[in-house]
Image (cartoon, rainbow, N blue to C red):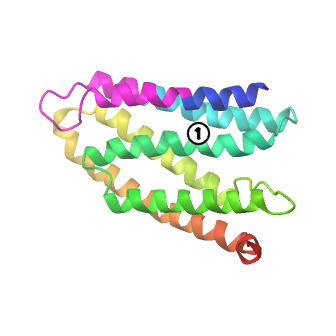
């Protein structure tokens, strides 16, 4: 297994670590402990950096594999979905936003399975909109966890307001990304049996 694929697997393994830290406290609740959100933010930022690094190294060293094309977006989906679930628990991410994110991910994953099962067995790699969606999701999550950890109690309303706005922006970009994937690859849907 090459280094970019190992970095992708490391990102997947960081998901439960992030979950542990995020579950130890809740922003806005009595007894909130910012150190756990800071730890969750650091783990999430580290995992997000591996997303950049594995893609960069795979392209630079010519190590792009079908496994990487499959596992990299899966790792991103696991990481961001878990983070948005905790943000929904905190009242920052609307269930509508999370539903849009999940609907897009299921639709694109289904499309990828149809393409992989086609007679020429094509792997659909991430396009620019998918990358923009992922970066925006990751930056929004990083903002929330670091802002929640570092902002004082008087800034809670600002952190919540900005985070809610970012979540709705993520929903819009995610929807556009999903529509673009489906339109660009509709020939797989039209030819599927």
Residue 48 is situated, as x and y percent measured from the top left of the image, at 56, 35
Residue 117 is situated, as x and y percent measured from the top left of the image, at 76, 59
Tell whether 130 sits left or right of 143.
right
What is the crowding at mark 1: few (fewer than 14 residues within 10 Å), some, or many (at least 20)?
A: many
Residue 75 is situated, as x and y percent measured from the top left of the image, at 59, 39
Task: Please state, as top left, top right, bottom left or bottom right, where the N terminus lies in the image.
Answer: top right
Taking the image as drawn, is residue 51 in sight? yes
Query: In percent of the image, x 66 and y 37: which residue is there?
Result: 52
Residue 187 is situated, as x and y percent measured from the top left of the image, at 76, 74
Depicted 46 relative to depicted 55: above or below: above
Task: Please check the rendered image and state whether residue 44 is part of the magenta-colored stretch, yes or no.
Answer: no
Q: Quadrant of residue 145?
A: top left
Tell me the magenta residue range.
13-40
Q: Nearer the viewer, residue 154 or 94?
A: 94
Tell whether 159 sits left or right of 169.
left
Taking the image as drawn, is residue 168 in sight? no
Most distant residue in the front direction = 193
Q: Quadrant of residue 19?
A: top left
Query: In percent of the image, x 75 and y 40: which residue is there?
Result: 67
Tell whether 65 sits left or right of 131.
right
Query: In percent of the image, x 51 and y 66: which residue is there?
Result: 175
Q: Which residue is mark 1?
A: 75
Task: Please state, as top left, top right, bottom left or bottom right, where the C terminus lies in the image.
Answer: bottom right
């Amino acid at each position: 297994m090459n280094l970019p694929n190992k970095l992708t697997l490391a990102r997947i393994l960081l998901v439960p670590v992030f979950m542990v830290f995020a579950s130890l406290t809740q922003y806005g609740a009595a007894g909130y402990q910012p150190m756990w959100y800071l730890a969750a933010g650091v783990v999430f930022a580290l995992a997000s950096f591996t997303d950049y690094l594995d893609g960069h190294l795979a392209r630079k060293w010519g190590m792009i594999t079908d496994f990487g094309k499959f596992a990299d977006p899966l790792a991103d989906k696991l990481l961001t979905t878990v983070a948005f679930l905790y943000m929904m628990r905190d009242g920052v991410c609307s269930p509508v936003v999370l539903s849009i994110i999940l609907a897009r991910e299921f639709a694109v994953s289904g499309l990828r399975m149809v393409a992989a099962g086609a007679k020429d067995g094509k792997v659909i790699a991430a396009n620019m909109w998918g990358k923009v969606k992922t970066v925006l999701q990751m930056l929004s999550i990083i903002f929330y966890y670091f802002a929640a950890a570092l902002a004082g109690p008087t800034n809670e309303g600002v952190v919540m307001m900005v985070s809610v706005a970012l979540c709705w922006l993520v929903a819009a970009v995610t929807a556009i990304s999903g529509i673009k994937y489906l339109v660009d690859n509709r020939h797989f849907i039209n030819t599927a049996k």
